[in-house]
Image (cartoon, rainbow, N blue to C red):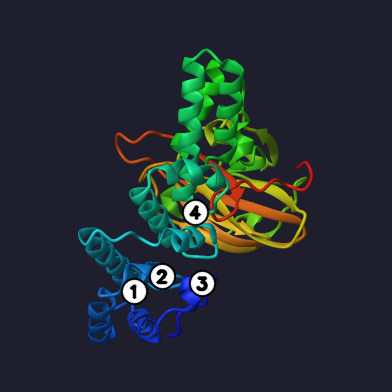
Amino acid sequence: MAMICCVCHAVATAHPAIQHQIAAIRAVGDAGQGSGPAAKAWRALIASKPDQIPVILAGMDGANSLAHNWLRAAVDAVVDRARQGGNALPSKSLEAFLVDDHHDGQARWLAFDLLVGQDPSMRERYLPRLIDDRNLDLRREAVARVLDDADRKLTAGQKPEAGRMYQTAFDKARDRDQVDLAVKKLNELGQKPDVSGHFGFLLHWKLIGPFDNTKNAGIERPFPPEKEIALASTYPGKQKPVAWKDFRTKDDMGVVNLNEGIGNSNEAIAYAYAEFPSATDRETEIRFGSFTTVKLWVNGKLTLERYDAYTGYRTDTYVAKVHLHKGNNTILLKLCREIPPEKRLEKWQFNLRVCDDIGTAITPATAW
């Protein structure tokens, strides 16, 4: 397998032997096929000079997990030998590698770590440029720096400046713990950040139910909402006729409490429906959490179904990669409740958000 083309000058001018060694390692299969030639190539590769580190890092672009690990170990070996011999790492080519976000995210993180290990001032030099990075490890470091700076401003009594910095951290953070910390600080300063908007949670839903799920017989049974979305229609429910009703959650994390919206009923089925207007055709992710068995349809297509009920609840438990077309898109959830296991909370709830592959919220083109 040919090594993926790179923009770094050092990669473009790599020695043919090193190119061949990296190609042999990249050819190893997920189940270990080709390990013999890969091991031989690895032993030769770790003898490389430090100026070839960016070349090896570039070999991680698009590599499978096993080849990725071999190449990472090769970098570690070359770095260890360079440090033992008192030789400097190639800062300029590592910097060029770091700032090129077409490279593998873990490889870029390793380049950053190597640069900082050689020159700690690199951290302050580069972190401001990484605040919008698509690599979540690099982005996290950049957000952590902003949070630290904000803490220092707050300690010094500079509340307006601290507030602006906490807001920046909130806007840029993608990890839940950093978002929570920024929200806490902003609340203490009297500011109210838009948490649900930041994550992209859908707050407005149409709900209908309960339908019958005695002995879990309703899980595979297609109730009327699976056949048509007729928001003005009424259908036979578990105990009485049911109709669609509007529901808007006020929870910051977009949690829809079905006990509140539908009624507290065991062995029951509920459906939740929303529409999502998109300004363009685009690839996206729908992420959601649910305590109970759940099915998801996007634009009428069954996209995801999970049967691991009562195993815990957290945001983004399930991730479905979906294509949204320009214009209106439909989202339908089927939430199947059985009799909860003994000592389990009788929670019947979900939350759902639309975002890109690093968790950045995608905003509907128009109001729902």
Tag 2–tag 4 contact (CB < 8 Å): no
Dot 1: few (<14), some (14–19), or many (≥20) neighbours within 10 Å?
many
The disc placed on residue 60 is 2
Mark 1 element type: helix
Residue 218 appears in the rendering: no
Tag 2–tag 3 contact (CB < 8 Å): no
Residue depicted at x 34% and y 36%: 344
Tag 2–tag 1 contact (CB < 8 Å): yes
Mark 2 element type: loop
In the image, residue 287 above or below residue 344: below
Judging by the rendered image, the residue that carries numbered circle 4 is 135
Q: Amino acid at mark 2?
A: Met
Q: Amino acid at mark 3?
A: His
Tag 3–tag 4 contact (CB < 8 Å): no
The disc placed on residue 9 is 3
The disc placed on residue 67 is 1
Mark 4 element type: loop
Q: Residue 20 in the image: state x and y as whole percent.
A: 37, 86
Q: Amino acid at mark 1?
A: Ala
How far is the residue under mark 2 from the one under mark 3? 17 Å
Nearer the observer: mark 2 or 3; the answer is 3
Q: Nearer the viewer, residue 169 or 334?
A: 169
How far is the residue under mark 2 from the one under mark 4? 15 Å
